[in-house]
Image (cartoon, grey):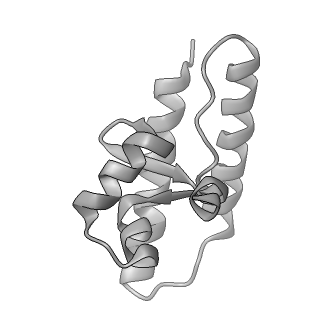
Amino acid sequence: MIDRTDVEACKIGLLWIRRHRELHRQPPSAAIDRALAALDHLTCALAANGQAAQPDPGNWLTTAEVAERMGCSQRQARRIAADLGTRIGRQWLIPADRLEHE
C-alpha cells in the first residue's frame, strides 16, 4: 500500500532530477512535470482517505524567500514563520497571502 511518505519520496526524487537537469543545462522534461502533477493528485486522493495533505508549494514561501522580500535575516524569517507558517520536515513554509497582510 502506498502512503503519503512514499509519494513524498517520489516527489523529492523527481524534483532532484529536474534540478539536476537545470544545473547541467539540459532541456526540461515534460515527463517529469507530468509525473509531479500525477503525484500531486495522488496526494490529494490520500488526503481524502484521511491522510493529511501537504501545502501547495506554489502558494508558500521559504524562510530564505521571506528574508529576501522583507530585507531581514533568515533567523528573523524563521521567527516570523513560527508565528505565521507551518513546518514540513526541517523546512518552514509561510503562506504568501498571510505574509502580505502582516
Vertical order, 29 against 82 (above or below):
below
Is 98 left, or right, of 68 in this rendering? Answer: right
Residue at 60%, 41% (x, y): give it. Answer: 55
| 65 relative to 40 in the view: left or right | left
Q: Is residue 21 visible?
A: no
Residue 85 position, x and y percent, is 48, 43
Q: Quadrant of the C terminus?
A: bottom right
Q: Position of residue 5 (x, y in %)?
A: 46, 26
Q: Quadrant of the N terminus?
A: top right
Spot occupied by residue 23 in the image (x, y as percentages of width and height): 37, 81
- In this view, the residue in front, 65 or 22, is 65
Q: Is residue 24 above or below residue 37?
A: below
Observer-nearest residue: 78 or 36?
78
Reply above or below: 10 against 25.
Answer: above
Residue 2, above or below 37: above
On the image, which quarter does residue 62 sit in? Answer: bottom left
Taking the spot 64% from the left edge, 47% from the top edge, the residue there is 56
* Image location (x, y in percent) of residue 28: 58, 78
At a point 35% along the width and 46% down the height, the residue shown is: 91
Residue drawn at point x = 68 percent, y = 21 percent? 46
Query: In the rendered image, is residue 97 in sight?
Result: yes
